[in-house]
Amino acid sequence: MNQVWIDEYKKKLVTADEAVKCVKSGDWLEYAFGVCSANEVDAALARRKDELLNVKVRCDIGSYQHYSAEADPSGEHFTWNSWHVGGHDKKFIGKNLYYVPMKFHENPTLIRNNACPPNVSVCMVTPMDKHGYFNFGPGAPSVWAAMEKAEYVIVEVNKNMPRGLGGNQECVHITQVDFVVEGSNPPLPILPSAQPSEVEVKIAEHIIERLYNGNCIQLGIGGTPNAVGSMVAASDLKDLGVHTEMYVDAYVQMAKAGRITGAKKKLDKYKQVYSFAMGSQELYDYIDDNPGLAAYSVDYTNDPRVVAQIDDFVSINACIEIDLFGQVCAETVGTRHISGTGGQLDFVEGAFKSKNGQSFVCLPSTIDLKGVIGSRIKPILSPGAIVTDPRTAVHMIVTEYGIANLKGKSTWERAEALISIAHPDFRDSLIKEAENMNIWRRSNFR
């Protein structure tokens, strides 16, 4: 290793408590995405609670304990803001953590264009390599945008972080950071793969029938995408490509089964492209120094204009409910916040614009609410529900009863298509509601 970089490293090496001395009252801190979020640095920040007021922390699925949020339930000293809402975020949402609406591909642009520039950027990274670089591992969506705008850049070293090859903007040099903190090397958070239900398997079967050799696949999170991955791995499909925001275990399963080569991709041929990864230890081990994968910033992976350049693109995501007009909610139950817009709309739009592209948004036809079964296909969205995908963007909706293609359909045709894939027990009541809303014709099916 170059002695110059070693000396630079030693000069910038500090404790977490020393690093956070740069934080002032009123500052904004940007924590990197997911498993690259702050850990020891946030714990040190919490210890400064009585010295600071109105410090704003912004994160995106912060995967570690939120020490500063826990230290200040009132939000007087530390207020958290999340680009999404992950597991650790949920117990603080509406108390001292608030959601930041965005389309994921615009995240770096929002930071760079001074809509929300941070004062301090914090990222968990791999140990420095022989060239003086720290790697962002499985969390590269917008780290560099934050580093470019921040007055201070802090990296928190974790020996358990896999090295994700780029791509672009997947690493930072020792000369570009202000403080290096050697952390306690916590294991990366594991995101268990959701086991698909019988209904989710049926939904996946409808999608599998539409796949063919050479498709480029984007999978969201949940039981249905996992079911699709398992079915693809067991199929005879070949030369599949990967271009996704989130790299999940289903891709590892498909790749190890020989289904993924990327040979038919027009962009990043032979590479599995992703922006971040969360899953099992097997997934993190698979990413580590794997030249078949390429980590990119999210303004590349999720830009609908980029996705549209990839022929035969297939996007598979999930939602909570949909109304008869075709409006999709994937982030709230009424006003109760569950998730975030994330990249769903990015891929819904990009996949449709791809040559032969297909965008699937999936949901079981029913939901069990404390023993009462209800339809997820509703006349109108639940009061307070957020529209994730507007009706103008939605392509295909999938339940266990089939696929409804909404593109180019008028309001009565949409109502008919959606009711045809609703649970049979709710179809008559949905028809009556459609009639009341004047989106049903006498010639529609009965």
Image (cartoon, rainbow, N blue to C red):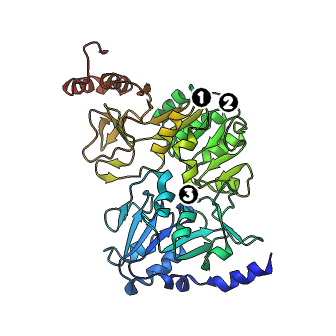
Give the amino acid type for the residue marked by disc 2 in the picture.
Leu
Q: List x then y, in percent, for residue 216.
A: 62, 37
Tell me the mark number nearer the camera, choosing from 3 and 2.
Answer: 3
Quarter where residue 215 is shown: top right
Disc 1 vs disc 3: Cβ atoms closer than 8 Å?
Answer: no
In the picture of the structure, the residue carrying the numbered disc 1 is 211
Quarter where residue 89 is shown: bottom left
User: Can residue 246 be spotted in the picture?
Assistant: no
Alpha-carbon span between mark 1 and mark 3: 28 Å
Residue 226 against residue 4 in the figure, above or below? above
In primary-sequence order, the first of circles 2 and 1 is: 1
Q: Dot 3: within a 10 Å radius of its alpha carbon, few (fewer than 14), some, or many (20 or more) residues?
A: many
Give the amino acid type for the residue marked by disc 3 in the picture.
Pro
Q: Is residue 121 left or right of residue 72?
A: right
Q: Dot 2: within a 10 Å radius of its alpha carbon, few (fewer than 14), some, or many (20 or more) residues?
A: some
In primary-sequence order, the first of circles 1 and 3 is: 3
Q: Quadrant of the C terminus?
A: top left
In the picture of the structure, the residue carrying the numbered disc 2 is 237
Disc 2 vs disc 1: Cβ atoms closer than 8 Å?
Answer: yes
